[in-house]
Image (tube, grey):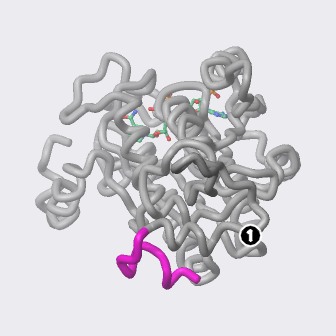
Amino acid sequence: MLSYGPACGVPVVFAQSVIRPRDAKQPERKKGGHTIPCCRPPGPLPSSPFEYMAPKNPKGGRSAIIIGASSGIGEALAKRMARAGYRVALVARREAELQRVAEAINRKDRKLATIYPHDVTKFEEAPKLFQQIVHDLGGFDTIVYCSGVMPPVAKNEYSFQKDQQVFAVNVLGAMAWLNEAATRCERQESGTIVALGSVAGDRGRKGQPVYCASKAALASYMEGLRKRLGHRGVRVVTIKPGPVSTPMTEGLKMPFMISADEAANQIFRALNRTRTTAYVPIIWWPIMTAIRCVPSWLFRGKDI
Ligand SMILES: NC(=O)c1ccc[n+]([C@@H]2O[C@H](COP(=O)([O-])OP(=O)(O)OC[C@H]3O[C@@H](n4cnc5c(N)ncnc54)[C@H](OP(=O)(O)O)[C@@H]3O)[C@@H](O)[C@H]2O)c1
């Protein structure tokens, strides 16, 4: 079926018409006084041909679970995905912020966002909440783990308490949620699992040794999942943003900083492409490729 897709250059409409179930309700358009079925499914146009190949949710439309959706990149991505017609489950601790995001997404005529207040460090709650969300959505196509913390760390500070919190949110919380998603995706042989790593995970830096280590661990975990699930029709995507203007980076001056909306647009585009690791913005790919090649003895002397 996939051989009809855009990869072999056949117009998208063929791929879409092959994948859509026969009994799916089709929009209609008028031509010369006659009503004829339209090839395009209802809803906004996809941003890429690969969107047509995404599995459809049995309840209709596509759906996504976004963990860490109460601010910054997660909030912007939730709004971007909702604009593309996804129903979104918004997860984070701050209920009022989640409510604000949901209100911005939901309109009178369409309720696309539902909120699920949750602390990702309460690992034991993840399996039950995951099942509840999947039940409410009627399945899911994409899960995005955005939750993350980067507490300020002084140059001579070695606080195990802070380090533990960073690993609990950035790594263990991701495993608690994405293991659940992986189990389901493996069974249904479809789905997209996404986590927000960082360019900071590519090398250890003296300013934030543990944050860098947490993002390196997350990238490694995602690579392992990809090897397990790639051949089962499941996409596992690691996003590595450079600096993005969000509450996390408030007051920090960093190079090539982009807005959360711009980051969300680029992440959304990456979800619909074949890439498994995406630097956002793309300028960080050559930069980090070069930085990763710097030998350790030389990197040690650099002031980063
Ligand atoms: N901003 C950047 O420059 C940048 C660059 C590279 C990677 N990243 C990564 O991108 C992700 C999003 O960061 P951001 O910049 O958008 O930061 P942000 O605005 O501070 O958002 C962080 C999100 O994580 C959630 N979160 C934190 N602790 C949580 C917990 N215990 N339980 C559940 N959710 C929790 C927050 O929700 P609640 O507080 O409501 O729980 C919030 O929704 C992070 O993983 C970050 O490491 C950011």
Q: Is residue 4 above or below residue 138?
A: below
Which residue corresponds to the image point at 63% horizontal and 47% vertical from the top-left?
42
Judged from this view, the residue extending furthest toward the front is: 33
In the image, 36 versus 253, the foreground residue is: 36
> Residue 56: x percent and y percent?
69, 60
In the image, 125 versus 39, the foreground residue is: 39
Query: What span is in magenta?
Result: 1-11
Is residue 106 in sight in this rendering?
Answer: yes
Q: Secondary structure at mark 1?
A: loop
Q: Within 10 angstroms of label 1, few (less than 14), some, or many (20 or more) residues?
A: few
In the image, 41 versus 5, the foreground residue is: 41
Number of numbered markers: 1
> Residue 164: x percent and y percent?
59, 41
Task: Read off the residue under disc 1.
Answer: 22
- Quadrant where the C terminus lies? top left
Is residue 217 in sight in this rendering?
Answer: no
Q: Is residue 138 above or below residue 2?
A: above
Which residue corresponds to the image point at 51% horizontal and 72% vertical from the top-left?
14
Residue 268 is inside the magenta segment: no
Which residue corresponds to the image point at 58% horizontal and 46% vertical from the top-left?
33
- Quadrant where the N terminus lies? bottom right
The amino acid type found where label 1 is placed reads Arg
In the image, 293 versus 26, the foreground residue is: 26
> Residue 83: x percent and y percent?
54, 35
